[in-house]
Image (cartoon, rainbow, N blue to C red):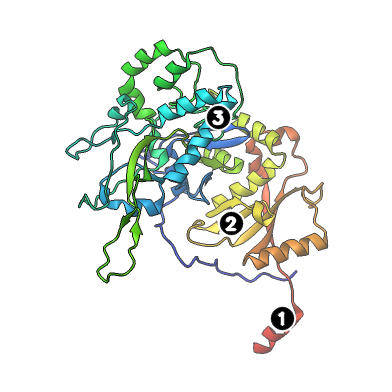
Amino acid sequence: MAEAVFQPPRRKRRIFESYESPFPVDVDGKDFRIYQAEIINNNVIVRNPEDIEQLYSKGYFGKGILSRSRPVYSISDPLLVTKWQGANINLPVIASKKYQYHVQWAKSILQEQGFDDCSVTKILENYTKPLELPFMKNDGAEQTGDRCNRMGPSTENVELSRHSSTDTENVVSPSHECHNQKEGSKKACLEGDPVYDALAVCGSKEQEPVDLKEIAEVSCQKHSFLVHCGCKVKESTEQRSCETVASKECAPEYVLVQEEEEGSLCPEDNSAGEQENFVKKEKLVCRRNPFRIFEYLQLSLEEAFFLVYALGCLTIYYGEEPLTILKLWKVFSEVKPNFKTTYMAYHYFRSKGWVPKVGLKYGTDLLLYRKGPPFYHASYSVIAELVDDNFEGSLRRPLSWKSLSGLNRTTVNASKELMLCYLIRPSDMTEKEMSTPECMRRIKVQELIVTRWVSSRERSEQDEI
């Protein structure tokens, strides 16, 4: 090991977003709000699209489960959106093949619930019939979303030609915007639905006997729009009376599917008289999406606890019960045995202005970013260890020279530096004190950067001096 020389963080070549000031928020409390998350299968999940955007943009907390990092997943195909940009639409546009995948996924869920193939086919055929184009009047003006809920299956197709409209206005709403929640709501109304909720455990449960024909014709606004949820058909009247309220929180998702017209091959004009080329005619057909996919923000345990304990801007629920700070400290320690050690390191580096992220892909506990992942590559890979005053104790991750050399080589090849972060606890600190996050007041931190000393490189640098 040798004395480390400061190396500036490696900036990314292309940056596509502007930097926003991180948390904490305005001290006067004008912009302060409490965000909400919930624990599902030992994961901390944020569902509200507004909360997702704020938490990620104000400190890069969490990761979109359907995206590489920033939660920007949209059901629309970007190429198709560009292709049909003159159609003046505000619905997601997807390919016919992608839509068929969603139908197959919905079919498998129905079969798991015990429906026979004939019933499944009838339900899906009725559900996926072409519809009138929602949000649009005959004169082309936009209409409110209530019409989507009242609109039933229709056999009338709405075809949008690429050349029939000269309006270049294009507003395509992503999938998660179709189920905006009211501020302060505890969870999405589709939460736990095995069809719509990607985190719900899909299992066969006994359902109350209901007429399949009624299931196919009645849409349940409370739970889902396809799979039988056990609700009585007679409840549909009461649900329809609350359509206006339900549509704001849980509007059904409609998509525009690009399909080929029957007999769509037509000869293309060829002035040279050469062999004719045939062009396929395509159209957009409005259909209901039988399998909706929502983007969630998944927070690491350290990120979630920091937002609760250090910033006080997040409330975490387990079922219907909000968890206290002490309860979270206990639960997270049981879920992740080394949580206390990694959180202390996370809290320390966050307070120093770094953006820590999970370092699992490089074999470490944390990765440290300057400003955030969109602007710089990670500068350090961190291993956290809890020791006593004499740097003794049972190490959580004992490293041999061989494993340390391999880890350091992996880190250097990724243009990072390996850092050992020692969290020093007093020898007289008891386990009772460690059972509360207030123990961090007595913890000291010491960092050690590991570098490989190369004799030939050192000799050449000395000669230059």
Query: At 43% from the left edge and 26% from the top edge, which residue is drawn?
Result: 225
Question: Where 395 sits versus 313, above or below?
Answer: below
| Residue 327 quadrant | top right
Label 1 is placed on what type of residue? Glu
Rendering coords of residue 116 (x, y %): 56, 23
User: How far, Cα to Cα, is label 1 from label 2?
Assistant: 27 Å
| Residue 38 quadrant | top right
Front one among 109 and 373:
109
Helix or strand or loop: what does disc 3 sit on? helix
Q: Earlier in the sequence, mark 1 or mark 2?
A: 2
Query: At 62% from the left edge and 60% from the top edge, which residue is drawn?
Result: 380
Residue 58 visible in the picture: no
Helix or strand or loop: what does disc 2 sit on? strand
Rendering coords of residue 287 (x, y %): 37, 35
Residue at numbered disc 1: 458
Helix or strand or loop: what does disc 1 sit on? helix
Q: Residue furthest bottom?
A: 463
User: How far, Cα to Cα, is label 3 from label 1?
Assistant: 64 Å
Few, some or many residues within 10 Å of mark 1 (<14, 14–19, 20+) = few
Residue at numbered disc 2: 368
Query: At 72% from the left edge and 49% from the top edge, which residue is drawn?
Result: 424
Q: Earlier in the sequence, mark 2 or mark 3?
A: 3
Rendering coords of residue 246 (x, y %): 36, 24
Label 2 is placed on what type of residue? Leu
Residue 428 visible in the picture: yes
Residue at numbered disc 3: 109
Residue 295's disc number: none
